[in-house]
Amino acid sequence: MDSSYSVKVGENVDFAFSHEQIAALDLIKTGKTSFHLLHKGQSYTIEILQSNYNEGTYTISVNGNEYTASIHTPLDELILKMGFATNGAKNIDSISAPMPGLILDILVKVGQEVDEEDQLLVLEAMKMENIITSPRKGVVKQVAVKQGDTVDKKQLLIAFE
């Protein structure tokens, strides 16, 4: 995994920093959200005005000038490269059987609105009952199985509008 952090300031300015470069910064914490940075003989007063750690977005003040920045860690970059997204489940338009089994119960019908994590159906596999839940909020477009059906792995179970 790459060990660089990508930082985007505003819409047009991009930086990449290695872990070593960050560790070598002459940075002193001067308050709960304020710092002093000495870089190439220049002094900078930095304050974090707002932060959203989960999204990696920050509003900072550098010498009195306000900037919006986003920081992506090496893990964030790996997730993007692999094609995974933190909201990937929101784009799912159908549910397929995760394993072969028997449909014991169907808990929804066509046209029904469901929320994320609502129970959709019960699949018995390897003598265990598995409750299949909705990956997103939506409307059931199709129920492709009925109670008592035997299904194969990856067989369509439910489709969303």
Image (cartoon, helix red, strand yellow):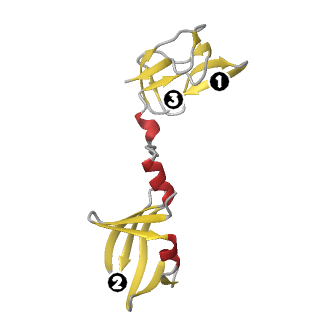
Q: Residue at x 62, y 25 (%)?
A: 131
Secondary structure beneath label 2:
loop
> In terms of image quadrants, where is residue 100?
top right
Alpha carbon separation for disc pair 1 and 3:
13 Å
**Residue with the most extreme right position:** 127
The reply to whether dot 3 and dot 2 touch (C-beta < 8 Å) is: no
| 42 on left or right of 153 | left
Q: Residue at x 51, y 56 (%)?
A: 75
The reply to whether dot 1 and dot 3 touch (C-beta < 8 Å) is: no
Q: Nearer the viewer, residue 4 or 107?
A: 4
Type of amino acid at the residue the image marks with label 2? Asn
Which residue is identified by label 3? 134
Which residue is identified by label 2? 63
Please state the horizontal and vertical placement of residue 110, each as a whole percent of the image: 43, 15
Label 2: how many residues lie within 10 Å, few (<14), some (14-19) or many (20+)? Answer: few
Please state the horizontal and vertical placement of residue 149, each as a whole percent of the image: 58, 8
Which residue is identified by label 1? 130
**Residue with the most extreme left position:** 12
Say which label, 3 or 2, has the lower sequence index. Answer: 2
Q: Residue at x 37, y 24 (%)?
A: 161
> In terms of image quadrants, where is residue 67?
bottom left
Q: Nearer the viewer, residue 110 or 69?
A: 69
